[in-house]
Image: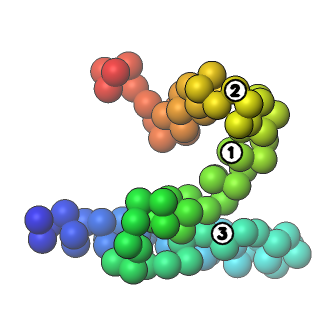
């Protein structure tokens, strides 16, 4: 359990540094980025809070450019599947995982 806790915090710090450097370099070009990973991994008390904090910009992009144009709440059960496939491909889904 302790190894998983420290690995999750290590990954959080690694991605936080990458995101902050990318955000700072975008800021030099006057590009405004959304705040991503605004809460520490240990400071989230629900899965929804973790998702909104960890993948904040990805969540907003998916809702804005995939969920709403594909039908949103009216066709929720149909719309969810292409979004899950997209998120799986985004995270390097491999055929052996299926």
Which is closer to the viewer, label 2 or label 1? 2
Residue 8 appears in the picture as rendered: yes
Residue 17 appears in the picture as rendered: no
In the rendering, at what x and y percent does residue 43 appear?
A: 39, 80
Separation of disc 1 and disc 3 at Cα?
Answer: 20 Å
In the rendering, at what x and y percent does residue 53 appear?
A: 54, 68
Residue denoted by label 2: 75
Q: Can you say whether 26 is above or below 92 in the image?
A: below
Quadrant of the rendered image containing residue 34: bottom right
Which is closer to the viewer, label 1 or label 3? 1
Q: Circles 1 and 3: CB distance less than 8 Å?
A: no
Point 59% across, 26% down: residue = 77
Separation of disc 3 and disc 2 at Cα?
Answer: 36 Å
Point 32% across, 72% down: residue = 9
* Label drawn at residue 43: none
In the rendering, at what x and y percent does residue 5 appear?
A: 22, 69
Tell me if mark 1 has few (under 14), some (14-19) or many (20+) residues whose alpha carbon lies within 10 angstroms of its own: some
Which badge, 3 or 2, is on the more N-terminal residue? Answer: 3
* Label drawn at residue 62: 1
Q: Can you say whether 98 is above or below 43 in the image?
A: above
- 28 or 11, which is in the foreground? 11
* Label drawn at residue 22: 3
């Amino acid at each position: 359990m302790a190894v998983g806790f420290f690995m999750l915090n290590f990954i959080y710090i690694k991605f936080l540094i990458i995101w902050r450097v990318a955000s700072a370099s975008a800021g030099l070009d006057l590009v405004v980025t959304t705040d991503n990973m605004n809460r520490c991994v240990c400071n989230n008390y629900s899965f929804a809070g973790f998702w909104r904090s960890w993948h904040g910009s990805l969540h907003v992009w998916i809702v804005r450019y995939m969920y709403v144009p594909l039908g949103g709440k009216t066709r929720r059960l149909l719309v969810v599947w292409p979004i899950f496939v997209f998120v799986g491909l985004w995270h390097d889904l491999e055929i052996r995982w299926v």
